[in-house]
Amino acid sequence: MKLEQAETIVQAARRHARANNLKPLTIVVLDDRGAVRCLINEDGTSLHRADIAIGKAYGAVSLGISSRKLGERAEKQAYFIAAAAQAAGGKLVPVAGGVLIRDADGTLLGAIGISGDTSENDEAACCAGIAAAGLVAET
């Protein structure tokens, strides 16, 4: 994931959020190793929004499925998700708002995580950011 791509994704997700009057967001983009490439906290976000956004993206990139799918799996296999969260050092938040980022060939580039509004709105902003960068969202 190039820094310019991460910045484009974050700024486009933010534009989507403002155009749709979402609550203040924290937006993070991680590369395919789970390292932070870009992170912003909009004015008015609460203290641990960054931790939640990182947990959504980190869980997605760590297990290769979106945080929405992690949440669905948590309903069926709570012990597995609890074990995965422990293995990930607690950085796994299994609710919508963590989306995998792929290129046109399907190569995993990283993940975006957003926290601040409803999980559905967070996820929609993720997808808007990814699309603006000409990449593919995997929810």
Image: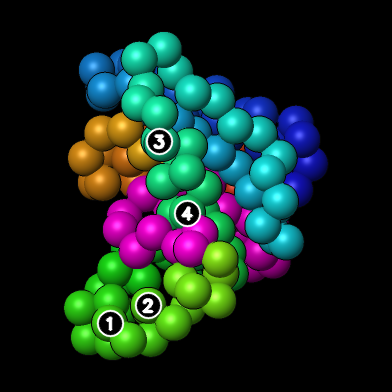
Q: Quadrant of residue 78?
A: bottom left
Give the labeled residue for mark 2.
82
At horizontal 35% and vertical 15% (from top left) the residue drawn is 44
Please, what secondary structure does the residue beneath circle 1 have? helix
Which circle, 4 or 2, is nearer the viewer?
A: 2
Are there few (<14), some (14-19), or many (20+) residues within 10 Å of tag 4?
Answer: many
Q: Is residue 44 visible?
A: yes
At horizontal 37% and vertical 49% (from top left) the residue drawn is 97
- Mark 1 to mark 3 CA distance (whole Å): 23 Å
Between residues 135 and 2, which one lies in front from this camera angle? 2
Left or right: 104 in relation to 21: right
Q: Which mark is residue 78?
A: 1
- Mark 3 to mark 2 CA distance (whole Å): 21 Å
Considering every residue shown, the one lying at the far right of the view is 2
Name the kind of residue labelled 2 in the image.
Answer: Ala
Q: Quadrant of the C terminus?
A: bottom left
At horizontal 51% and vertical 59% (from top left) the residue drawn is 91
Give the labeled residue for mark 3.
49
Q: Is residue 45 magenta?
A: no
Give the labeled residue for mark 4.
55
Between residues 36 and 136, which one lies in front from this camera angle? 36
Please, what secondary structure does the residue beneath circle 4 have? helix
Q: Earlier in the sequence, mark 1 or mark 3?
A: 3
Q: Earlier in the sequence, mark 4 or mark 2?
A: 4
Q: Above or below — where is 112 with respect to 39?
A: below
Name the kind of residue labelled 1 in the image.
Answer: Ala
| Tag 3 near tag 2, CB within 8 Å | no
